[in-house]
Image (cartoon, grey):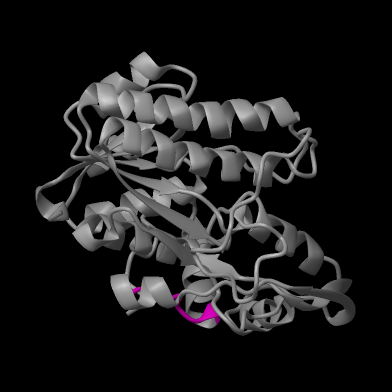
Amino acid sequence: MELSNATIAVTGATGFLGRYIVDVLLARGARVVGVVRNPDKAPELPGRGVELRRADLAEPDALAEGFAGADAVVSNAALFAMSYHRPAEYAETNLEGTRNVFAAAAKAGVRRVVQVSSCIVYRRDAPRPVREDAPLRERPRRLRSWNAYAATKALAERAAWQLAAEHGIGLTTIRPGGIYGAFDPNFTRVHKAFVRPPVSAYPAFFHVSLVYAADVADGIARALERDAALGRAYNLAGGDPAATAWDFLRAWRAAGGRAPALLLPVPVPIRQHYSVRRAADELGWRNRPLLDALRETLAAEAAGPAARRIAVGSAT
């Protein structure tokens, strides 16, 4: 697909990752339609040529109207928050919302969808580094607050593949690792809380597959541009070996981020390794260095929310 001649509908376009996706698509010349629950959340987007259409993930008819005229849909909206949410909320948003997106895409005549999934969809016993053909999590006996996000994202991806086949929709799934970037309400916010005091404990030996939000958006655009990506899933993560949380902290400090005068390492022996070879070979994608990404992150935050045209340069 030639993005300069395409209309792309993006759910969750006013959210954290959604803003990056919009920026990357606009930079490639696409016409972007943001299909969002609250258009007032991003009043600057229409001024940049983004058409905002109001629709909730629980409203398949409104979603179909939002997708009307689109050449492809980026199914990005989902519930993920480090604050407490009822397990049923995750199921309603992530699973039922996905089902509604595909029903709406079929009704609107859209024949291509890129779904933003997650590396968390894999079974915990998958061999390391985890490749895209590793098995996904099964439905748990009961959704609880600690497993609801992972379980519903895996169920949503299973539903997406099934519904895409039923409706004749070309599907690509993107599985990011832990996403960070400017105005991130989750991982980056927690990191800032750790480094705010003058003396702080910080995780060490924690191999976490982090990925810059702009690089996830770049991977989504690359998947749209390549017909070979149809029917494929791609890990977009830190690769193998993954950087540690301590590496992230060092890069943060080198980029000019605030850091405590005294840091106490707390051993957290967790290793998250996801292979990104498929994305590199088939999409030409790579995850840019932490230092470069964090410099862009801090510069974007210093400019303020009103100047949210976040860095869209490719990592290559």
Q: Position of residue 170 (x, y in %)?
A: 27, 45
At 75% across and 29% down in the image, what residue appears?
A: 86
Residue 155 shows in the view: yes
Q: Position of residue 245 (x, y in %)?
A: 72, 75
Q: Quarter holding the C terminus?
A: bottom left
Q: Position of residue 213 (x, y in %)?
A: 48, 61
The foreground one among 290 and 6 is 6
Assess whether residue 114 is covered by the magenta stretch.
no
At 37% across and 30% down in the image, what residue appears?
A: 102
Position of 4 compared to 134: left or right?
Answer: left
Position of 313 compared to 7: left or right?
Answer: right
Q: Quarter holding the N terminus?
A: bottom left
- Farthest residue toward the left? 5
Rendered position, 136 above or below 85: below
> Could you tell me what secondary structure mostly forms the magenta stretch?
loop
How many marks can you see? 0
At 80% across and 36% down in the image, what residue appears?
A: 144
The foreground one among 40 and 268 is 268
Give the magenta range: 285-290
Rendered position, 195 above or below 74: below
Residue 226 shows in the view: no
Position of 203 compared to 273: left or right?
Answer: right
Assess whether residue 287 is covered by the magenta stretch.
yes
Rendered position, 212 above or below 152: below
Q: Position of residue 37 (x, y in %)?
A: 45, 25
Q: Quadrant of residue 8?
A: top left
The foreground one among 274 and 20 is 274
At 12% across and 55% down in the image, what residue appears?
A: 2
